[in-house]
Amino acid sequence: MNINKKIAISESGFLFDSLTGDSYSMNPIAVEIVSMLKKDMTPDEIKYALLEKYEVSTSVMEKSVDEFIDTLKNLNIVSE
Amino acid sequence: MSRKKITVATTGLNNTDNPGPGIPVIRGILESKIFDARIIGLAYENLEPGIYMHDLVNKSYQIPYPTAGSDILLKRLEYITDTEKIDVLIPNYDAELYTFMKSADELNKLGIKTFLPTLKQFEERHKSNLPAFGKKYGIKVPHSRPIFNDREIYTLTTDFQFPLLVKGKYYDAYVAHNPEQAKMYFHRISGKWGLPIIIQEHITGTEVNVVALGDGNGNTIGAVPMRKQYVTDKGKAWAGIALGDTNLLKITSDLIKRTKWRGGMELEMIKTKENEYYLIEINPRLPAWVYLAVGAGQNLPEALVKLSLGMDVKPFDDYEVGKLFIRYSFDLICDLEEFEKLSLNAEL
């Protein structure tokens, strides 16, 4: 999964799509997920890493990560 | 290096909530590192804010409306050039461009240089000619048709679906959802800007605009695309952001190459969800948001002055994506004597 080349992401979690002019603020978990995507980690690897780090059930984590990645796809921020 | 002293006259000093491009053009020129410019404001109305912005405009003169004709305009400019040596004149309104283009030779005799589109370029990009323009230059344009009386509105459904756009030949555009609304807008716009009124297919998508400058030989001197971030009730950008949309830049440079566009321009486009680009309008001059281009690294007003003076201009090859402009309103306090002087003497 690749982050669109036109996307600029700051360390503070501000995301700017230079193609459309849209911008988004991400919470810390979203920033973590996006930075893992930037490191070419797969969704499964991301879920595993987050499960190791946070106290959360597998089902909640999987659902949350899948939903967030779907949102990123719908906004053309990432593509397969 | 000492800067070259020049005098530049511009119109478009109406820095209101529906601003003319005069003040942003002046700001660009005053930031030039090669020109030390004296600015002459040319105003139609005595309350155009730029007249009273003495830190930007050195002297202002009222000029006759374009409807008075080019002879009267030239007489007024002859009077002005008796006291001012104007090197470059930059008209900033669509409605006055024809008069200035027609007068270019006479202006040249007065020592005033311009860098304007040719009459052919100006005419063929008219809103009423847009379908033919799109076909000739291979650009997608919305279906549109000029109409000359309101009865034609009731025959539109064979060609168009509501909602549709009702547009003036120079300014103003409204979305009409039914024939009654279309008729109301027809009269509102035609009362202000005359006929024809242009009926245009309503394309759904994001409006994206490009400010650009062509050298008249097919080269793009500079271009910056922008998306409006905040829009006034008149549809004017109150804030906007510079985009890194290479498709828009390619469309712009192709168009300038094929038309050999001469001077400033603004492309108004709609980008659909399917990533298709529709040209909805070409404004044949720099737009009121041109200062974003200056802020992003392309001083297009300065480049326009250089082109007017016949200087070599190297095309810009970059700009800062993500640069924003945000307008604000500001109350100028003026003495009655200034208003009185302008009203009585038509100069300040």
Image: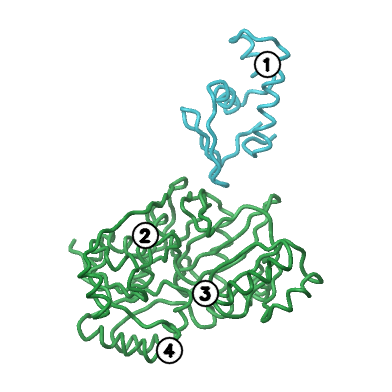
Q: The residue marked by circle 2 belongs to what chain?
A: B
Colour convention: by chain
Residue under label 3:
B260
Q: Residue at x 65, y 70 (%)?
A: B184
Q: Determine which of the numbered discs, if any, sits on residue B69 in the image.
A: 4
Vertically, is B247 above or below B43?
A: above
Chain in cyan, by letter, is A
Q: Residue at x 56, y 42 (%)?
A: A22
Vertically, is B334 above or below A59?
A: below
Q: Quadrant of residue A24?
A: top right
Judge by depth and name the residue closer to the eye, B95 or A40: B95
Q: Residue B11 at what x, y percent from top left?
A: 36, 73
Can I make out residue B174 in this image? Answer: yes
Residue type, label 1: Met
Residue type, label 2: Asn
Q: The residue marked by circle 3 belongs to what chain?
A: B
Toward the bottom, the furthest residue is B71
Residue under label 1:
A61
Q: The residue marked by circle 4 belongs to what chain?
A: B
The quadrant of the picture occupied by the C terminus of chain A is: top right
